[in-house]
Image (cartoon, rainbow, N blue to C red):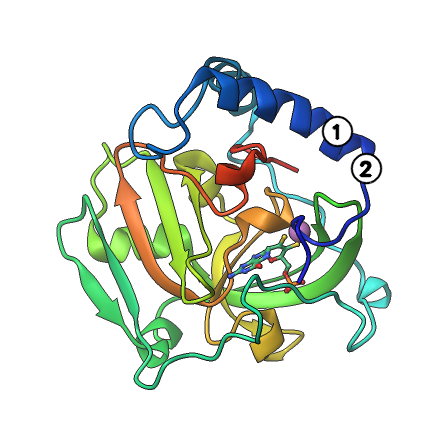
Amino acid sequence: MSDTPGGRILTRRKLLLGTTAAAALGACDSSRPHQGFLGTMERFNLRFQAALFDPERLAPEEPEEALTRPGAFPQYFVSSEMPRAPAGWALKVGGLVKQPRVLSLDDLYLLPRTDYRIRHHCVEGWSAVAAWHGVRVSELAKLVGADPRARFVEFRSFDSGYYSSWDGPSAFHPQTILAYGMNGGPLPPEHGAPLRLYSAVKLGYKMVKYLTEVNFLPEPTGGYWEDRGYEWFAGV
Ligand SMILES: Nc1nc2c(c(=O)[nH]1)N[C@H]1C(S)=C(S)[C@@H](COP(=O)(O)O)O[C@H]1N2
Ligand SMILES: [Mo]
């Protein structure tokens, strides 16, 4: 695949993010992602962006005409071949929760469903529109009894260890879902089947496809691209 999160085009945005990230990596030991993961600059940046983030504000929905035509929505995975769900796939939900659970897709279908049609923004500069449906991360948090001290949520996948960790307000935003459907049908393998994270409030690389685990945690961890210098907050 490519050595950047969605292509090789160097945008101004990436250059800006790169500068911040370089400062962050210089200020902390990135080989210990679970301890003091964020560098000084990035910590400052995070506080600043988190303060500006409005957890109630909904991103605008796109009209049906704006839908990216079938097949033209880009597809990314870091594995050399398209990741396929292992037999008996189920989602492990844990961390600081009252009741850790292992959920099948059927279990997830029973939870309240959220639908929207929004624009996707990749850090490399492309964007595309699709409709997505699934279960809010906030519903999942309710189901397992996530502890209020778990102010971060980590998402892991079966795509060569791809993962990302999120701030609570973004993860619990009403437009952040575990998506099992796209454009009215089941989620296709190239877009993260059987289950992926989707959201209106983050850049593409935060939205982990091919999910295996969701962990409600008291501290932020890293991420596949975040560990390679990309910004951790990455709000749209
Ligand atoms: N597991 C996994 N999730 C991932 C990625 C990936 O390579 N592997 N790429 C990310 C990036 S950079 C983007 S832009 C979106 C792309 O989603 P799509 O392939 O459905 O277009 O997925 C994100 N989630
Ligand atoms: Mo991306």
Residue 183 visible, this angle:
yes
Q: Which residue is mark 1?
A: 15
Query: Where is 12 relative to 77, above or below?
Result: above
Q: Position of residue 117 (x, y in %)?
A: 69, 61
Residue 51 visible, this angle:
no
Image quadrant occupied by the C terminus? top right
Residue sitting nearer the eye, 37 or 133: 37
Task: Point out which mark residue 223 bears.
Answer: none
- The Cα atoms of the two marked residues, 1 and 2, are separated by 6 Å
Instruction: Inspect the image, locate mark 2, and give the three-letter code of the amino acid beneath it.
Output: Thr
Q: Mark 1 near mark 2, Cβ–Cβ under 8 Å?
A: yes
Q: Is residue 49 left or right of residue 65?
A: left
Q: Residue at x 33, y 55 (%)?
A: 214
Q: Secondary structure at mark 1?
A: helix
Q: Residue at x 50, y 56 (%)?
A: 208
Image quadrant occupied by the N terminus? bottom right
Q: Which residue is mark 2?
A: 11
Query: Where is 88 relative to 42, above or below?
Result: below
Farthest-out residue, bottom: 87
